[in-house]
Amino acid sequence: MLKKFLLSTLAALTWNVGSVMAQDNAGTWVSLFDGQSLKGWKAGEHPASFQAKAGQIVCAGPRAHLFYVGDGQADFKNFELKADVLARPGANSGIFFHTAFQAADWPEQGFEVQINNSQPRQGNYLELKKTGSLYGVRNQYKAVVHDNEWFQLRMTVRGNQVLIWVNEMLLVDYVEPAEAVPPAKGRYRRLSHGTFALQCHDEESEVYFKNVMVKRLPDDARNNVLPPVVDDTYRQIAGLQDANFPVVNSHVHLKGGLTLEQALDGSRKTGIGYGIAVNCGLKFSVTNDAGIEAYLQSMKGQPAYVAMQAEGREWTHMFSREAIAKFDYVFTDSMTFSDDDGRRMRLWIKEEVEVKDKQKFMDTLVRRAVAILNEEPIDIYVNPTFLPDVIAGEYDALWTEERMGKVIAAAVANGVAIEINARYRLPSPKFIKLAKQAGAKFSFGTNNTDNNVGDIGYCLAMVKECGLTWEDMFVPKPAGQKPAQVKPAKP
């Protein structure tokens, strides 16, 4: 017991001495790499995976981590760090902070800032966390930089807050809760102190670092940000983030005065990624290719998905396939269609809806939905199974398993994901379970009509009730594989 006490006391004194010495360099940018050698750095396993070449640290080879040891006082609590990074296609890497030297394996201590623009599936696993993510804590799902191009990665840790920028674009604003939240893998992450490490992830990953610099901040530096309230929703989202589950609200509109910056700030605070959608179609804000181009320019370089909400059935003739394919994804619904008598209905507008025969109406609705899924170049089918107010109370009776099956089969056959819509609380758990069993993919959406984006509570409830995992979720298709590029146009 006395030995343990002396060792723990010595460790505390060592850290305190290092902390006091570090205050002398507070506020000054210091280079951690001399540009010529790996002096001050120490690799765990496979040291040959790291080399100093042409003013750069080259990471290429078997898995390894290069820890900064400095002059023996490499211990950082509050700091700013920046580095210029270049990743080759398919590479995965990262910068760890608050970590400690390990001779082998993945670092057990600290946090990782992710570097991954385009890593493909590795066996049964597809890494969805992109460059700039606070790995497994606050994930960025859209790549904001390109392979083979230098970019700056910058981070600040002050008190209970972590900020991460890529090319001076703020991606992460994480405030640590007062209580520890156990992630899915059971390892508690808490801000503390430690050193930095560069990652060589695997033999297929090649990444370069230069201008690696740090500025110490006082150990007692604080901010005025209150810790978040930890409730069941917070815990569930934290667990999903850690489990590679893409927590993305793919159906957000800038409406009711909601600005892009307000939306992005909300996304950073909650850790929920956003897809910002513009309505495109007859009598909507965007009606031609020029309108699409103007919208895309306004969203250029932003850390959110950019989506097209295709309205009505006329949209396929209003826009070119080339323009449509510039969006990250396209979605539509079957809430606007013409019945067999040629009557055009928008199902959410009471005055336009006519239901003479409920069963006949449902059969027509299902046929229209299947036709949309078969013929229109979309990625996601949103507001699924929506019914007009006049028959919405009979949802369970009217949406028979046979009708559900027809819509699900068409979605799966055409590679179209099905939205779990939080605003309308659709589709039903039964529909979701049948769709999962059939191999469908899913997305989340709130479909806000004003400046309140809304919450994804129903979506999270369905994840639990229906047993959804990251592999069940929609991921935007890469350029060249988008529906507008591969789906034949209807004559």
Image (tube, rainbow, N blue to C red):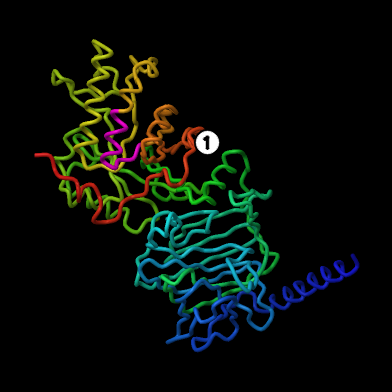
Which residue occupies the foreground of this view, 385 or 402?
402
Amino acid type, label 1: Lys
The N terminus appears in which quarter of the rendering?
bottom right
Residue 72 in the image: state x and y as whole percent: 69, 81
Residue 62 in the image: state x and y as whole percent: 49, 74
Left-right relation of 397 to 236: left
Which residue occupies the foreground of this view, 162 or 398?
398
Instruction: Determine which quarter of the picture holds residue 341.
Output: top left
Q: Is residue 10 above or below residue 426?
A: below
Residue 236 in the image: state x and y as whole percent: 56, 42
Furthest toward the right, the residue is 2
Q: Is residue 209 above or below residue 314?
A: below
- Residue numbers of the magenta segment: 406-418
Q: Residue at x 43, y 61 (%)?
A: 169
Left-right relation of 201 to 145: right
Provide the major secondary structure of the magenta segment.
Answer: helix
The C terminus appears in which quarter of the rendering?
top left
Mark 1 Cα shell of 10 Å, populated few (<14), some (14-19), many (≥20): few
Instruction: Determine which quarter of the picture holds residue 215.
Output: bottom right
Q: Which residue is mark 1?
A: 464
Instruction: Determine which quarter of the picture holds residue 343.
Output: top left
Q: Residue at x 49, y 86 (%)?
A: 35
